[in-house]
Amino acid sequence: MKKFVISLCLLLGVSLPLYAQPLPEPEGKVILSIAGKIGKSQDGKVARFDLSQLQQLDSKAFYFQTRWTDTAHEYHGPRLSALLEAVDAKGDIIRMTALNDYSVDIDRAFIQQYDPILAWQQDGRKLSVREKGPLWLLLPIHEFPHLNEGESSAKMIWQLRDIEIR
Amino acid sequence: MSDSFSNRISTPKRGVFLALIVLIFFISALVSLVQLRESIQILEARYGTSVWSMFQLRIEMRRFYDALDYYHEDEHDVERIQERYDLLWSRFPVLLEGLDGEHLHNVEQGTLILQNAFSELKKQEAEVFEQLASDPRSAQRVRDAISPHLAAIERLTLENYHLNNEAFNRGDAQIAALQQKLVILILGLIISGSLLLHMVVKENRRNRYQALHDSLTMMPNRAYLRRELTDLCNRRRPFAMHMIDLNGFKDVNDSLGHHTGDLLLKAVAARLVELVDHHHKSLTCRLGGDEFAVLQYGVATEDEMQPVIRQIIDALEDEFLVEGHACYIGASIGSVLYPEHGHDASTLLSRVDMAMYKAKEQGPTSSARLFQLEMDKWQQRRHQLNRDLREAIASGGLHIQYQPIVSLSDGSVRSLEALLRWNHPELGPISPLDIIDVAEQYGVANELGCWIIERVCQQYQQWLESDTDMPPVSINISPSMYRLDLVDTITQLIRKYGLSDGNIWIEVTEDTTMKVIKEAEIVLSELKEHGVSIALDDFGTGLSSLSHLQQLNLQALKIDRSFVKDIICCETSAALVKNIIAIGHDLGMRVVAEGIEDRDSAALLARYGCDYGQGYLFSRPLLPAQIPGFCRQYGLHQSVLLMRAG
């Protein structure tokens, strides 16, 4: 019985802080802020990320040519769904805003269906603002060519700055 | 055929018509395709993302410019200006490299304006990132450098917007016009497509009709009959089938030509439909040649068949008037009953054929026979005979006997008739008529005929070698041998065995010869030229025409045994024979009486002036070895001896 109580206390002592643990503070320059209906943040309102934090998320790479470039490139970055999980996003509409205030809304279903990435790297080099960095939402247009046209292509927001979960 | 449309157009015209429709179809399709592509191109052209991107560029340029304007030598301001610089920079590749700038070359100097602005921006990089923080005048310098480009970009942005708008409006009008034309083209496609489909369906129906109907009489054909039979058998509906073969059709065809023959067939078909089908609700089909079949539905007994058979015979025995020629034909009818005589189409067809064949044998007058199981046996016997006949010819199972023909005045031997003998190992002796019949039916008649001629010539040579004076031997010729090169065959064999003119005679029957009268006429006179005399066998039994007696170059006339056997008891027979003898003599022929079995007949015939006699009274057919002895015993006629001396 005594052993059980100790184990229970230990379990609680370990798991509770884990569960309620706020996101670690970014050490480098903040490149992405997430607000709205999220379960995890640093201050209970906004989750801020520097590049190294984003690099720790589950990532993947795409190789293709977008309609805005003249050659194909390899793009690498965290899966948007991994990011949403990291902040425990609870809303279904993801509003994304760029440095130039351009913004798009994406449904969670769309994210689940196409699994986009937030590319921070192009051909092994960090994306600068001039190259549509620091973060560029990219859809798997090599697998779904129709995503490269019209409304879908407009969802591939670059120079991403803020995300609001609604 | 109930077809109204394609029947109105004759075949060559139909070809042109079809080609025209196909042409319209393909031209419509092609033009539609081209127009659709054109529409797509117009739509693609107006899909102008350049307007958006140009406005974005203009905004960023303006923001950068304004940021420089508000510069207050503040570190925060510097960072903001640098960020605006980067953002502005990022807008250029979108237009210069990507698809968004694709249509900018439509605007005068559009791309050049962009390139110039971008390179100016690049030139200012050092100012913005190095000088600006320390040198307040730097902002002014950058502004001055950028300013003209800002103006140019603003102009380009508006002009591009304007052009795109215009393209939109113009494109709408163009597409509307194209769509209208497309409506007409698609209408053309639908109409020509429907016509094509219509023609294909018609053609298909016509082909199906043709496959099941006879092209001459438009009656159902053999394929149709077979289908109908199978259907009736499957549904187990009782019915009778009568197979009709026209008697004497070949004569019409031969003497009046195929055209008249065809007209006669059409008249026969019409009469069968009108007099038989309409009254008995039966179905007449033409099976080919002069063969027809009548399906009588719902009949189970022989009695029920009779009215139809009677009707067929009556219909066909009446005179046919074809192109001014009166033609008299008759019908040989074989009949079967389902299910009594067979349970499937093939069996019924084969059995009705047998019954018809049997009826035909009763000819030349019209007759009808119902199938009987014995016929099947008879047919099987024929099959066996056919199989074994080839074998017998090859292995020497056949042999020849010789029956003497003697002078009625002095009893001397005048000639011999070669008679074919076949002692079948299972079926016993087979009559020569059966052998010839089977040979004719199964196409071995020529082979058999040649074998007989050669065998006789060979035998004759043997007799001559043993230094015996020999009377001539006559050989019977079967119908199909006229189609063979008979003259060549006989003369070559005569030469091969060293025989002389007059050693070999040919006997032809009336039926045989009349069937192929044209060929016969030529062949027989050629044979005469080569010293081969001709005797007409079985005179009085077949299809006789006295004119043929004159027409054919004949040297002897043989009176059939059926007349001879009654001459003592029957005055009519006696009168007939007496007159035949007179006719023969008048036409310069020797007359032979066949089948003499008693002395009284022989004496009477001698009194009538008949030259020669043949029959058991004088001798049965003898084996070759017996012949020389017989000749020695009865003596040869002077003419034979003279011939030898000559």
Image: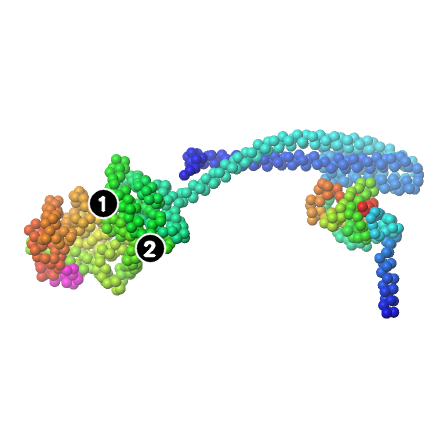
Name the secondary structure under disc 1. helix
Q: Position of residue A100 (x, y in %)?
A: 82, 40
Disc ID at residue B453: none
Q: Position of residue B611 (x, y in %)?
A: 10, 51
Find the magenta span and give its range. Answer: B620-629
**B203 sits left or right of B151 in the view:** left
Q: Position of residue B77 (x, y in %)?
A: 90, 40
Name the secondary structure under disc 2. loop
Residue B500 appears in the figure: no
Crowd around label 1: few <14 · some 14–19 · many ≥20 (10 Å): many
Circle 1 sits on which residue? Answer: B517
Residue B545 appears in the figure: yes
Chain of the residue displaying label 1: B
By secondary structure, the bulk of the magenta-drawn segment is best described as: helix
Residue drawn at point x = 20 percent, y = 59 percent: B400
Q: Position of residue B480 (x, y in %)?
A: 26, 50
| Magenta-span inclusion, residue B425 | no
User: Which of B232/B55 is in front?
Assistant: B232
User: Which of B432/B335 is in front?
Assistant: B335
**B24 sits left or right of B563 in the view:** right
Q: Amino acid at mark 2?
A: His
In front: label 2 or label 1: 2
Residue drawn at point x = 23 percent, y = 51 percent: B362
**B21 sits left or right of B320 in the view:** right
Whether B85 is drawn above or below B640: the answer is above
Residue drawn at point x = 61 percent, y = 34 percent: B35
> Marks 2/1: CA distance?
39 Å
User: Which of B179/A10 is in front?
Assistant: A10
Disc ID at residue B341: 2
Q: Amino acid at mark 1?
A: Ile
| Magenta-span inclusion, residue B624 | yes
In the rendered image, the quadrant that contains the N terminus of chain B is top left
